[in-house]
Amino acid sequence: MHGRRSFSFVQSRELAELSAIYWAIESMNSMRKDKIIFESSCERARSCILTPSSCSGTMELVGKICDLVQRFQHWSFDHVLEARNVIAQRIATSVTSDRRYQSYIASGGPNWLNDLIAYEARNAAPLP
């Protein structure tokens, strides 16, 4: 599965990160997935979720996120280092820097992406 969404006129990095997380959770819910592991390297969103009162203007969105994840049978929200999200970061960079407004992932993606996915699959640590 692949999806993409852009947000404009967002007032802070915290709101941008939280909006992206909410969109991802909402997407999994609409696809009727009920066993989900969400991973994010968004430091500011993590802080807002852990201590909502520390981020002004985000409490309502944090509340919506917390309510929405309760719809899943099993879920976790894990913070990971950016190094774990290299593929997502490279896709985002290529979309913004190359002004790719139409999805190119669904059509197979560029060679560098296939090579990176293959490399990560070969070198990934096995799941416990």
Image: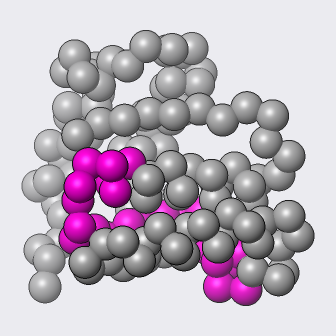
Residue 46 x/y as whole percent: 62, 74
| Most foreground residue, 8 or 124 | 8
| Most foreground residue, 116 or 65 | 65
Q: Is residue 99 visible?
A: yes
Residue at position x 29%, y 25% in the image: 105
Residue 74 x/y as whole percent: 26, 79
Locate the C terminus and report the quarter of the image it occupies: bottom left
Extent of the magenta region: 27-51
Residue at position x 11%, y 74% in the image: 126
Residue 43 x/y as whole percent: 64, 69
Residue 41 is a magenta residue = yes
Residue at position x 68%, y 63% in the image: 61
Residue 60 x/y as whole percent: 74, 67
The chosen color scheme is one colour
* Residue 104 picture quarter: top left
Picture layout, residue 116 above or below residue 35: above
* Residue 53 picture quarter: bottom right
Picture layout, residue 18 above or below residue 95: below
